[in-house]
Image (cartoon, rainbow, N blue to C red):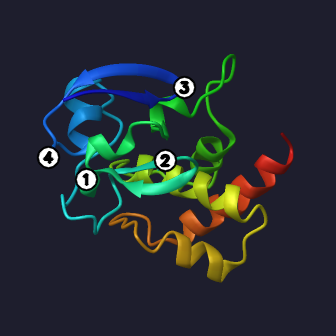
């Protein structure tokens, strides 16, 4: 099948088979390797991207379903002239980046969370990030990073 995917603001014509996951197309066809495959079953959140500003597990999503939608990967987070997006900066400043494998998924899930809840409560943070797993941080630094990111985003 021939489809066009809009990823990080750019259109990419790709030839895919109907059963290819978005994760496979991002990594293997578009060479956007920031999106990780952890479990392959949608449990860990390492493959999280945003589709129309909503978090989505790319390992469980057929690429063909994404035609006409705006997909954001970790590679698309930075803005011209800025080394880090405010959410990425907050993760670094809060010490929420350790091994880094889960970080792209958490950063994108956080960005989606902050678009939905600009000033989230602890319960909203926990609920919205429940689909992402981190084996290193103990989650306290991630909670702190989300709160710092919310403050950073208000300054934009």
- Pointer 4: what residue? 19
- Image side of residue 28 versus residue 83, left or right: left
Callout in the foreground (2, 4): 4
**Depth check, front residue: 132 or 50:** 50
User: Residue 133: where, in percent of width, then height?
Assistant: 36, 67
Residue 61 position, x and y percent, is 29, 53
Cα separation between marks 3 and 4: 24 Å
Which residue is at a point 59% across and 29% down the rendered structure image? Answer: 78
Check if mark 3's residue and mark 4's residue have beta carbons within 8 Å: no
Secondary structure beneath dot 4 equals loop
Q: Position of residue 57 (x, y in %)?
A: 35, 57
Q: Residue furthest bottom?
A: 123
Within 10 Å of the Cα at label 4, are there few (<14), some (14-19), or many (20+) other Cα atoms? few
Q: Residue furthest right?
A: 155
The numbered mark at residue 51 is 2
Residue 38 higher or lower than 81, as above or below: below
Earlier-in-chain disc, 1 versus 2: 2
Q: CA distance from mark 3 to mark 1?
A: 21 Å
Precedes in sequence: disc 2 or disc 3: 3
The CA span between labels 2 and 3 is 12 Å
Upstream in sequence: badge 3 or badge 1? 3
Q: Residue at x 26, y 22 (%)?
A: 14
Label 2 near label 1: C-beta < 8 Å? no
Report the disc number at residue 9: 3
The relative height of residue 115 versus residue 82 in the rendered view (above or below) is below
Calculate the distance from the C-alpha at mark 1 to the C-alpha at mark 2.
13 Å
Left or right of residue 119, residue 128 in this image: left
Which numbered dot is residue 59? 1
Q: Secondary structure at mark 3?
A: loop
Q: Is residue 61 rendered to the left or right of residue 54?
A: left
Determine whether 107 is above or below 116 in the image: above
Most foreground residue, 32 or 149: 32
């Amino acid at each position: 099948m021939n489809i066009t995917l809009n990823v990080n603001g750019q259109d990419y014509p790709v030839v895919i088979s109907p059963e290819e996951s978005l994760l496979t197309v991002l990594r293997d066809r578009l060479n956007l390797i920031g999106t990780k495959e952890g479990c392959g079953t949608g449990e860990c959140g390492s493959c999280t991207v945003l589709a129309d500003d909503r978090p989505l597990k790319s390992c469980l999503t057929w690429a063909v379903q994404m035609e006409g939608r705006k997909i954001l990967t970790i590679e698309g987070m930075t803005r011209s002239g800025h080394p880090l997006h405010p959410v990425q900066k907050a993760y670094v400043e809060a010490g929420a980046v350790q091994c880094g494998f889960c970080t792209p998924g958490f950063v994108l899930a956080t960005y989606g969370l902050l678009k939905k809840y600009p000033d989230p409560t602890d319960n909203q943070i926990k609920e919205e990030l429940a689909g992402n797993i981190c084996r290193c941080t103990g989650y306290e630094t991630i909670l702190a990073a989300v709160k710092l990111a919310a403050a950073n985003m208000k300054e934009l």
